[in-house]
Image (cartoon, rainbow, N blue to C red):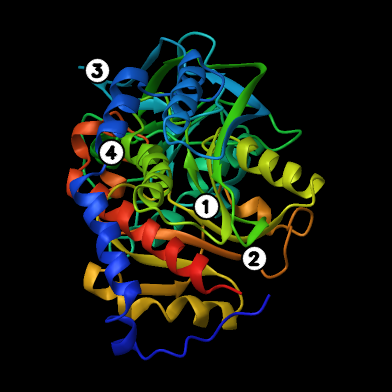
Amino acid sequence: MCLLTLQLSAQDLTTTADSVFIRNIFDQALVEGESYQNLEHLCKDVGHRLSGSKAAEKAVEWGKKVMDGLDLDRVYLQSIDVPFWERGDIESASIKSDKDITLSIRTLGGSVGTNGLMQGSVVEVSSLEEVAKLGKEAIAGKIVFYNRPMDPKPISTFQSYGGCVDQRYAGASVAAEYGAIAVMVRSMSLLEDDGHAHTGSMGYKTGVNKIPAVAVSTHDANVLHDHLQKNESTEVELNVNAHTNENVVSSNVIGEIKGSVYPNKVIVIGGHLDSWDVGEGAHDDGAGVVHSMEVLRILKALNYTPRYTIRVVLFMNEENGNMGGKGYAAKAKAKNENHVIALESDRGGFSPRGFNILADSSQVDFVRQFREVLEPYGLHHFEPGYAGVDISPLDTKENKVNPDLIMMGLVPDSQRYFDYHHSDTDVFENVNKRELELGCGAMTSIIYLMDKYLQ
């Protein structure tokens, strides 16, 4: 791939047709936009949509119907096998004392159930390493309570999240190796929330006993911590009936506009259609779904003819397996498709700040050339960084379909994301219309510029 070095100065660029067209893109997003109403339909008519569920299939039908209405060159479903985990209808936890203290919990995705009431003494730890250090003598027969909070110091809350999510995903397997009977994990949130525990995926190491794993709200994690500080022995009673079914067949939803110059070179844009089975999946990732579809709608509305094929994929099963992303990449490789750009939105519907860029240094410099023309719209972050889960399989040694692929992720303001992430409060009412629409404008603008100047 040859990356065209723009011959225009920043001042020239902002006074050319590019500047005018980008203004038109944002006008479309802010005045004629359909993203907010689409998100409302997804959240209210479909609701939460964990892969394998009937709601997830309803979401597939909804996504195809919306893209069918965009007058695209092609809309189709791509079949994939997905896991089907169910939370069950029982979730309760309480500290056993003179007066039992109820704790707000959510079973972690993929967990087994307790097989009825389970009661055990609690051991509090702050890391996976601490479990190993304590060993079987302290851990066996106990409930391990992982209570490492998200660090409030990083400006990006995703950095804070990355610093403690290991206890949620791997905590059960590590504790089980030392004989624990269950684990409780402090919710991944900076908000002290007393009514809403935050769920999320967890996994079991092969050959290790599967034990129940639940998240406890940040407020009630503090309550449990305080109780442990005051009482030499603290007992907790758990009861959850989660279970995993056989895999089911689901679909990625795909729509595209064929390229006029490079029809066999693909710019792929996407978000994930599935969500956790709490809340409505509004920020995670309903916002990314409507962001992505709106790119095609805006380009069509402005009569823009792309040089490259622009394809939107609504991925299924990002939350607990990423089978949509893996399946898409595998099928792209099998068909020898040539992807030149992959852009993902999966950080919520907040005000856009720019883009993470996963590419070599010359490609990062190419994308950074557009910063000046996009800064008036609040887009200033054009830095190397992680692009996204759904598109990540395109970048593996096994599946990468183009060694020059530029991968990007939309970066909105992150301060409120983990207030809602994976919880009952991730609902349509907690998405701001204007912020969502600005994200659509940002996504469409960078795709327009890259489609025009990439050689």
Rounded to the nearest angstrom, the CA distance separating label 1 from label 3 is 28 Å
Which mark sits nearer the N-terminus, 1 or 3?
3
Under circle 2, the secondary element is loop
Which mark sits nearer the N-terminus, 1 or 2?
1
Which mark sits nearer the N-terminus, 2 or 3?
3
Q: Residue 34 carries which label?
A: 4
Rounded to the nearest angstrom, the CA distance separating label 1 from label 4 is 50 Å
Amino acid on which the number 1 mark rests in the picture: Glu
Q: Residue 100 carries which label?
A: 3
Q: In the figure, is residue 390 to the left or right of 345?
A: right
Residue 372 found in image quarter = bottom left
Q: Mark 1 against mark 2, which lies toward the viewer?
A: 2
Residue 178 found in image quarter = top right
Which mark sits nearer the N-terminus, 1 or 4?
4
Q: Which mark is residue 405?
A: 2
Which mark sits nearer the N-terminus, 2 or 4?
4
Instruction: Give the residue drawn at x 51%, y 65%.
Output: 451
Q: Name the residue tied to disc 1.
A: 130
Task: From this view, report whether residue 168 is shown above or below residue 64.
Answer: below
Q: In the figure, is residue 440 to the left or right of 322?
A: left
The answer to whether the residue labelled 2 contacts the one labelled 4, judged by CB atoms less than 8 Å apart, is: no
Rounded to the nearest angstrom, the CA distance separating label 1 from label 2 is 41 Å
Q: In the figure, is residue 399 to the left or right of 189?
A: right
